[in-house]
Amino acid sequence: MLITLLYFSISLAQHPRTLDQSF
C-alpha cells in the first residue's frame, strides 16, 4: 500500500493535470 501511494504521488507530481482529467 505504501508503494502504491508513493507511486501515485510521483505520477501526480509528474502529471498534475492527470487528476483534472480523471474527474
Image (spheres, helix red, strand yellow):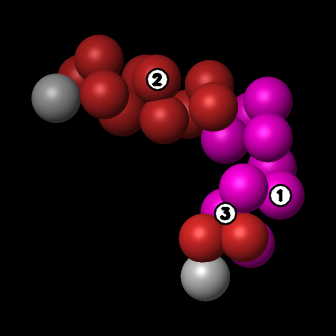
Query: Which residue is tagged 1?
Result: 17
User: At 80% across and 50% down in the image, what residue appears?
Assistant: 16
| Local crowd size for mark 1, using a 10 Å CA cut-off: few (<14), some (14–19), many (≥20) | few
Query: Which residue is tagged 3?
Result: 19
| Residue that protrudes farthest toward the bottom in the picture | 23
**How far apart, in angstroms, are the residues tagged by discs 2 and 1?**
16 Å
Q: Amino acid at mark 1?
A: Arg
Q: From the image, give the main secondary structure of the stretch colored magenta.
A: helix
Q: Tell me where the magenta segment starts and ends, as one range.
A: 12-20
- Residue 20 at what x, y percent from top left? 74, 72
Position of 19 relative to 11 (above/below): below
Query: Which residue is tagged 2?
Result: 7
- Residue 5 at what x, y percent from top left? 36, 33
Q: Amino acid at mark 3?
A: Leu
Ranked by sequence position, the earlier of labels 2 and 1 is: 2
Local SS, label 1: loop
